[in-house]
Amino acid sequence: MERKKAKKRPGNNRRATIDLRDIEEHKRPEIAVYAVDRSRKVIATADVDDKGQFQISEKVLQEAHQVIIGPQVEDIGTIERDKLTIYRASQIKQVLDDNGVLVIPKQKWYSWFLFWRCVHGTVTHCFPYPWVVSDLVRQVQLAQASISLSETILSDAKIALPTPRRIFPYRCETVCDGVVEVYRRICCCHPWIIYDPRLPELLEELEHVVEELPPIPWPPEPDPDPLPIHALPIFKHGALDERALRANTDLQAIRSLAPAELPAYINARPYLLCHCGSATQVAHGFIQPDGEFNICWHEWPQLMTINCHEEYAYVVKQVINGSLVTIYDGLAANKWFHYGDSADLVSHHLQAQSCRNNDFPGEGAFALLQDIGLMPSYKLKTPDATGWDRVATPVYNDGLAHPAANAAAAKGKYLDRNWGGKLLLRYHFSESMRGVGAKYYRVSVVAANANGNPTGTRSYLSPNEWRYYTFVGMTPHVEKVSLGPHSAGSQNDLYEIPYDADRAWHSGQYHAILKTNDFPNGRFLLTVEVFDNAGNLLRPTGTPNPGGSVVAAFTYRRWYQEVGPTAEVPFAALTHMLWWDNRKAKAKIVDLRVNGAANTAQCQFLVAAGSANFSVGYRAYHQEPMFMLDHRIWWRRGLGGPSGILTSPHPNPDNVGVPPALPHQSGSNSFSTMLAGLSNPKCSFSANLHVNVKTYNGIGTLDGLDAWDQAAFALEMIP
């Protein structure tokens, strides 16, 4: 029914009173009287005052088919009919002729109250770079490998892979534009009991989720394309589906636990326990410039039954390249919040657009190397510059990431890490650089000799196109622009410095991309230069002139400590040293040994007494010993049987069996240990070797450069 604003009609006005029974202890709801014709079109409305009185004309009553009393809203067609009190027009005439009082019971008028409901939250974009896929593979594999709750059963993934220092330690930025849709559902969480009849349904749901998880190849490529992240069903439109991530572990646990143990397990996990109704959109609103959203709406009161509650999910959309893109879908990812919770939404969507934060400590005009990938540049070990294009003679770990105090301190740890793969370089050009005439920048690399001087041909690097926000009316759009290359004067390969005043740039963008695989392995010099709009090289005041440069009032800075002042670099350009090595580690099982006697045969059926010791002869190393993290060697029995460790120590951080040295002998396990628990003491086995590298791109470890080998054999224990 279409609502019209309250209006007066000519004719004799009749006054009536609405008596809301038992209203004394309550504040009156805002109500109105609607006169409608036979097509249910509103022909007149009348507001009701705080005494319950309203006026209606004789003419309106003659034209009206029905008179409706209900809450004061814009469109009564949005109100369910059972919440309205409906009279025939003739009935209203009769009441007016009698005493003019319409009595409404509490059961009806109580539903006319409209309550304000509000939700609050933030939206963040965390960059889903390739290494995220690697960590997800690792996490999913560990979950899928848990075939038993027994701690004595080890999975290959648990043995082979170093434990991540933290899950998803990547950079996150504020999302400051977009639409947030709010959805609600009602969930009831009735406690689980022994032999609960809901068990078959729960198992079926978890089995369906597990079936949707595809096999995940291991290892990933050395520098994988980030697109496979969307092939993983644990991501739903950029939102991480934590239930899917845990589904296999939960399924195996529920199958393994005794009936008496199931209630405690399931009651502690609401995502397994609760049964929820369908979701309904209740509101929508916009993200504020600071990344927060505050969305409020009017609604009818709802009564919750015992053990039931409301939950809220959110869908975030942005206009990207002219299309409306869902960058976060909490509905699809089963990510729900209770009313009153602050909903901190994290999008992993590849296209999600966050806002650039170009703040960096320091005043005045300056330029420095800020980040390599997601690593701040103070974690780069580089010698002091000795010229615009060179550095001091390097020591053992110069050019590496996360430097250690000494070589021994780096063994078996993610310290003294070599670079590899594709490096994303972010510089900081302060906004004051524009005032000194800085228009362009240029980034280059050249090989370094043993003294830290440049040698060979210099190569110039380029960035991707940069993204920025633009507004069409009130709607934000995302556009791209190329920073170059430009030529000015006699200079080429120049790129425009993207100042904040130019455009509303997105965050997570880089000034140059260095593909280390395009160069030999070794130490290189990374240099950035700054030019004016005529192509003149700008050099800081008081620095040597390399030729063809002009003086400008700025400084180059080197970020060498997490907090505190940065170091001024007194030259006409800023140069750092990087040491990369894209070589794969080496792993080779050379022989199998019983009591130390080596056997190199292809097929081996080893028979010995239970006290005999089994071991392996193998090689595990990197051609540059500093760049191996560790290696691990273990055996596994049969199909899904137990495992045992052969590395000594485990894990082993040393390079072993490096030619021309002989193969290294592993630790040993006795035949009785390896065949324990079998009624017929013989079985097939595999021996597994995995070598982990430190190779790093500033975002994550390039696990594809790890090395692995495997051997198969059989053991039989005799008296």
Image (cartoon, rainbow, N blue to C red):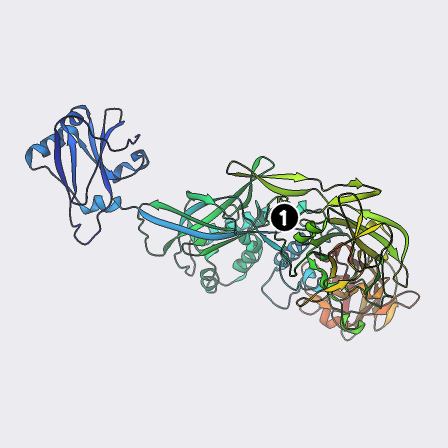
433 to the left or right of 602? left
Which of 92 and 636 lies nearest the eye of the viewer?
A: 92
Image coordinates of residue 122 in percent, x first then y, are 50, 53
276 to the left or right of 385? left
Which of 215 and 33 lies nearest the eye of the viewer?
A: 33
Label 1 sits on residue: 500
Which of 31 and 339 lies nearest the eye of the viewer?
A: 31
Query: Can you see residue 160?
Result: no
Q: Residue at x 84, y 42 (%)?
A: 490
Q: Give above or below for 216 relative to 620.
A: above
Q: Residue at x 19, y 27 (%)?
A: 9
Quadrant in the picture for the C terminus: bottom right
* Name of the residue lying farthest toward the left: 98
Query: Can you see residue 105?
Result: yes
Image coordinates of residue 287 in percent, x first then y, are 50, 47
Quadrant in the picture for the N terminus: top left
Image coordinates of residue 114 in percent, x first then y, are 30, 46
Q: Quadrant of residue 285?
A: top left
Q: How many marks?
A: 1
Q: Quadrant of residue 703?
A: bottom right
Image coordinates of residue 379 in percent, x first then y, are 72, 64
Amino acid at pointer 1:
Asp
Neighbour class for label 1 at 10 Å: few (<14), some, many (≥20)?
few
Q: Residue at x 55, y 51 (%)?
A: 241
User: The residue tagged with tag 1: helix, strand or loop?
Assistant: loop
* Name of the residue lying farthest toward the right: 660
